[in-house]
Amino acid sequence: MKTVNKRTTKYPIDDIFLKRFSPRALSGEIIYKDELMTLFEAARWAPSASNTQPWRFIYVMRETPEFEKMISLMIPFNKDWCIRASVLVLVVSKNLLKDGKISVSHSFDTGAAWENLALQASMSGFIAHGMAGFNYATAKKEFNVPEDYSVEMMIAIGKPGKVAELPEPLQSRETPSDRKPLEEMVFEGKFPNMV
Ligand SMILES: Cc1cc2nc3c(=O)[nH]c(=O)nc-3n(C[C@H](O)[C@H](O)[C@H](O)COP(=O)(O)O)c2cc1C
């Protein structure tokens, strides 16, 4: 058992899993291209079915028209804090295999790449906060995503900012979250009967 970042485990794990979390207080400071590419490099090494690597990342830098365009796709809740992101990323994945068949694992594989990116961001002193609260159909159209790619999520990347600069309702949420106990997600032999 250990406690790191106000999170307590039942079994020993590396601190990195507890340190990574999703704050919303971002500073808006510049992130250099090499720093950003390090995060994508980590994503690149994720495992995927048959090594298909279906993930693709479209990034936009703060203070560019494309950044404003990405912000405009978000629900108001996300706009409120993403305005201080340094980089926004649209994550998409190729949903067809080479032979034209539908990939069963493109989203799952891309989830692994996202987590690699998030863990590297945390280790590099950045915040990488995932988002599903935006208009997927408009994102696909506005960012020129081909038909055989699915929009998966957005990521706000930045350096830690001041909690006091967040809108009031978001300030109290700026704390690491807990998780369900292992017993609710790990089953030996078969899925248990639900009551
Ligand atoms: C696919 C995905 C979508 C998410 N969508 C949003 C979102 O739209 N807005 C938001 O503020 N956080 C969003 N989150 C962040 C989650 O709420 C957060 O990861 C979760 O509460 C666990 O907290 P932690 O990342 O701090 O450990 C999203 C995370 C993921 C992985």
Image (cartoon, rainbow, N blue to C red):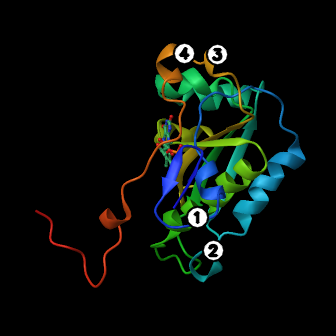
Inspect the image, locate mark 3, and give the three-letter code of the amino acid beneath it.
Glu
Residues at marks 2 and 1 touching, judged by CB atoms closer than 8 Å: yes
Residue ID for mark 2: 47
Q: Residues within 10 Å of mark 2 (few under 14, many from 20)?
A: some
Residue 195, given in percent of the width and then of the height, sits at 10, 62
Under circle 4, the secondary element is loop
- Earlier residue among tags 2 and 3: 2
Task: Please identify the quarter of the rendering in which residue 159 is found.
Answer: top right
Q: Residues within 10 Å of mark 1 (few under 14, many from 20)?
A: some
Under circle 3, the secondary element is helix
Q: Residues within 10 Å of mark 4 (few under 14, many from 20)?
A: few
Residue ID for mark 4: 167
Q: Vertical placement of 179 versus 12: above or below?
A: above
Q: Residues within 10 Å of mark 3 (few under 14, many from 20)?
A: some
Q: Nearer the viewer, mark 4 or mark 2?
A: 4
Label 3 lies in ligand 1 vicinity (Cβ under 8 Å): no
Residue ID for mark 3: 165
Inspect the image, locate mark 2, and give the three-letter code of the amino acid beneath it.
Pro
Q: Vertical placement of 152 versus 14: above or below?
A: above
- Earlier residue among tags 3 and 1: 1
Inspect the image, locate mark 1, and give the three-letter code of the amino acid beneath it.
Ala
Identity of the residue furthest to the left in this view: 195
